[in-house]
Image (tube, grey):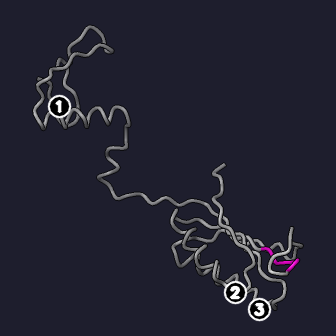
Amino acid sequence: MPSVDSGVLAPGHISGTNSANYSFSACFSGNSMLSWIAVIYEFLAPGEAGARDQKEVTLMNKYELAVVVSAKIEDEERAQIIEKCKALVERFGGTITEVDEWGKKRLAYEVQKMKEGFYYFIRFDAEPTVPAEIESRVRIMDNVIRYLVVRQDEA
């Protein structure tokens, strides 16, 4: 019967004429079968089996929040809205990498009877759950005409 000691197959436990032609005994005990599954899994996907025992690694993706703010409000109010957006990113564990102000631009079509708006782009790193949280809160902000959070490509 094949046995596995510390996750390594001992020589002589696999019979066959070449490495692609294995014949296994059909009488595995419960522990032995689990050991074989662990060895096969480690062979097919090396390095992934041990990751479950360690602390889970958090993924930080790169995102960009595009915000179009009403052109009818004062500069101080606009600055406060952008500060609120930046505070939302940081509140949910994101790290702001860049804030890009494009200024006043003509909208492609009329939105809420407005033809112009101030464009801002906030780039940040965050976990995958953060964009949904940010969008749900920016959605109800006054004087935000449009918003969108998109994931940036790694390239």
Element assignment for label 2: loop
**Callout 3 crowding tier (Cα within 10 Å): few <14, some 14–19, many ≥20:** few
Residue that numbered label 2 is attached to? 142
Q: Residue at x 88, y 77 (%)?
A: 115
Side (left or right) of 107 relative to 143 = right
Q: Which residue is mark 3?
A: 76
| Residue 98 visible, this angle | no
Between 48 and 107, the one nearer to me in the picture: 107
What is the CA distance from the residue labelled 1 to the residue labelled 2?
A: 64 Å
The quarter holding residue 41 reads top left
How packed mark 2 is, by other alpha carbons closer than 10 Å (few <14, some 14-19, many 20 or more), is few
Q: Amino acid at mark 1?
A: Val
Tell me, yes or no, if residue 124 can be seen here. yes
Q: For numbered disc 3, what is the local secondary structure?
A: helix
Residue sitting at 76 percent across and 71 percent down?
100
Question: Residue 11: x and y, percent?
Answer: 20, 20
Q: Which badge, 1 or 2, is on the more N-terminal residue?
A: 1
Q: Which residue is mark 1?
A: 4
Q: Are marks 2 and 3 in contact (CB under 8 Å)?
A: no
Residue range highlighted in magenta: 114-119
Closer to viewer: mark 1 or mark 2: 2
Quadrant of the frame with the N terminus: top left
> Comparing marks 1 and 3, which lies closer to the viewer?
3
